[in-house]
Image (cartoon, rainbow, N blue to C red):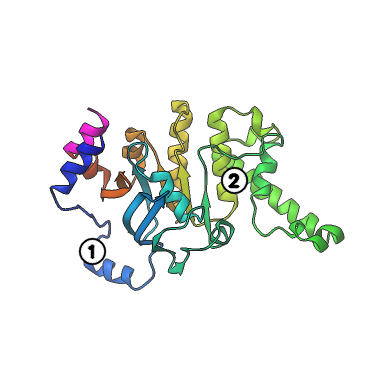
Amino acid sequence: MSNVLEERTRSEPSREVSLEPSESAQRRSLEKPAILDVHDVTVAYHRKPVLWDVDLVIREPRLIGIIGPNGAGKTTLLNLLTGFLRPDSGRCLLGGRETTHLAPHRIARLGVGRTFQDLRLIEQVPGLENVMLARPNQRGEGLMAALLRFGVAKEEAANREEAMRLLRFVGLADKAAGLAGELSYGEQKLLTIACCLATEARILFFDEPVTGVHPEIAGQILDLLRRITNDGKLVVFIEHDISAVRRVADLVIVMDDGRVITQGPPSEVLERPEILEAYVG
């Protein structure tokens, strides 16, 4: 697959397609920092590059799908943007703020949330408590507040109410009291989305949100990603299911061999012969 994509895309100029409706809208957009801005980023493992000179600029809230074969660098890019990796060269900015060398928890405080392929739920506690634990800046996290309990009970009640609202949003209200580990795999993925939303992040990264999920729940997850985007958030998701990407994405980014090789609307990118041959055969 790598040879098919690389040889054909290198033989023609990269098609970078703007989603802005007009030149005047573009000019207005340029007056403010991009939501996500990646400059010439390279990452290497043991001196072997896994990301090569990656450039991305996202200026408006969009639902963006990232596709590519295994080893293309998709999850590596997410790890880089969320602080779990440092680039060997290049810069990353979120909302105009330099994040290249910030730790994950500091990037999260800037309004960034993500899910992982391995879900990372606390399986021994109820789903409701998983969501409550994801709420930011809780008074009970401080020693004195935890001991004195000043304002903690009121905040816990508010967090519980918000957690229940998010469980209703993802369709898990009836599972609130059940242990997270007793949920089906698809339900656990829904729970990770609720936890991610509980952080109040405005930039959300989802790593393979519908992979391995029953088609009914997969459709539910895709609808949730669209609703989240419509609420004004930037949503970026990695997915191998091309039909899922085609169904909901505003913009598709194709990666191969650590490079962004093309990007654009699904109606254009997913109809290109080299992409169809690589994914469909």
263 in magenta: no
Q: Nearer the viewer, residue 123 or 30?
A: 123
What residue span does the magenta drawing correspond to? 273-281
Q: Nearer the viewer, mark 2 or mark 1?
A: 2
Residue 31 placement: quadrant:
bottom left
* Residue type beneath disc 2: Cys
Dividing the picture into quarters, in which one does residue 127 lie?
top right
Q: Which mark is residue 22?
A: 1
Q: Which mark is residue 163?
A: none
Q: Position of residue 174 (x, y in %)?
A: 64, 32
Helix, strand or loop status at disc 2? helix
Residue 280 among magenta residues: yes
Q: Nearer the viewer, residue 6 or 23?
A: 6
Magenta residues, dominant SS class: helix
**Circle 2 sits on which residue?**
195
Residue 94's place in the image compared with 190, above or below, is below
- Which residue shows up at 71% across the image and 37% down it? 125
